[in-house]
Image (spheres, rainbow, N blue to C red):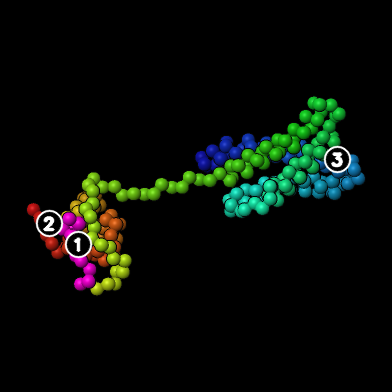
């Protein structure tokens, strides 16, 4: 509920502006169509076509940005369609205006406000989210050099060098810290993730930790 209230407070004014401006522009287009012989449902259909064309073109522009679609000319097709719809809406609004400067300004306000609202909604919906920061595991001490890692866990154990004493001591410290924090022995996958070694080397280290007593 709180998230919805925040979204409503943030996007509500823009949506209301788009609705009111669209209604004003719709009325001017419908009246202009009626004045030029398109009566009844046909006048309403023309007004709907013009306004929805602007909305559809704005959405296509947003989709092109998300998919990074290459542009072949100086302007994309959705941009041209949006410009054409705005010109038609503005022309119908000016046709209904009084032949004065303020009359033209007032009549052009719905079309301009509708374009601004649509562009704001397009800008918000096309904003990219920041990429999450990679999660890193930090340690109070620096890990000693590791022995060569083996990607194939099925290699024969006799062909792989055993863990170095420094690595074994560091693995013991990691296992002890894990046991102190979680009150249970560390497993192979966790040890492998903490040390950044292969599954086979993590298994060897874990076997040494379980069979070799901790030095006093």
Q: Residue at x 26, y 66 (%)?
A: 200
Determine whether 121 is above or below 204 in the image.
Answer: above
The span shown in magenta is: 158-168
Q: Closer to the N terminus: mark 2 or mark 1?
A: 1
Query: Is 37 one of the magenta-colored residues?
Result: no
Which residue matches tag 1?
Answer: 163
**Is disc 1 placed on a helix, strand or loop?**
loop
Query: What is the CA distance from the residue labelled 1 to the residue labelled 3?
Result: 85 Å
Which callout, 2 or 1, points to the residue nearer the camera?
1
Query: What is the CA distance from the residue labelled 2 to the residue labelled 1?
Result: 16 Å
Can residue 59 be seen here? The reply is: no
Which residue matches tag 2?
Answer: 214
**Numbered label attached to residue 180:** none
Which residue matches tag 3?
Answer: 32
Q: Residue at x 81, y 26 (%)?
A: 101
**Is disc 3 placed on a helix, strand or loop?**
helix
Which callout, 1 or 3, points to the residue nearer the camera?
1
Q: Residue at x 22, y 68 (%)?
A: 160
How crowded pointer 2 is (Cα within 10 Å; few <14, some 14-19, many 20+) is rated as few
167 relative to 96 in the view: left or right: left
Front in this rendered view, residue 86 or 1: 86
**Is disc 2 placed on a helix, strand or loop?**
loop
How crowded pointer 1 is (Cα within 10 Å; few <14, some 14-19, many 20+) is rated as some
Instruction: State the residue lying farthest toward the right.
Output: 37
- Asked if disc 2 and disc 1 are in contact, CB closer than 8 Å, the reply is no
């Amino acid at each position: 509920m709180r998230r919805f209230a925040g979204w409503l407070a943030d996007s509500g004014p823009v949506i209301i502006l788009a609705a009111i401006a669209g209604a004003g522009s719709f009325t001017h287009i419908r009246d202009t169509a009626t004045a030029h012989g398109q009566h009844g449902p046909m006048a309403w259909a023309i007004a709907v076509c013009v306004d929805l064309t602007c909305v559809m073109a704005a959405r296509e522009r947003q989709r092109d940005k998300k998919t990074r679609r290459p542009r072949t000319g100086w302007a994309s097709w959705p941009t041209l369609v949006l410009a054409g719809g705005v010109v038609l809406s503005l022309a119908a609004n000016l046709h209904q205006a009084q032949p004065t400067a303020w009359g033209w300004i007032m009549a052009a306000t719905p079309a301009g406000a509708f374009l601004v609202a649509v562009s704001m909604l397009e800008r918000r919906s096309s904003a990219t989210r920041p990429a999450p920061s990679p999660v890193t595991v930090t340690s109070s001490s620096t890990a000693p050099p590791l022995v060569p890692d083996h990607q194939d866990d099925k290699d024969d154990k006799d062909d792989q060098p055993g863990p170095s004493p420094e690595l074994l001591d560091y693995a013991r410290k990691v296992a002890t810290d894990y046991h102190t924090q979680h009150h249970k022995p560390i497993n192979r996958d966790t040890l492998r993730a903490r040390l950044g070694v292969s599954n086979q080397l993590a298994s060897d280290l874990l076997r040494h930790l379980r069979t070799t007593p901790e030095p006093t």
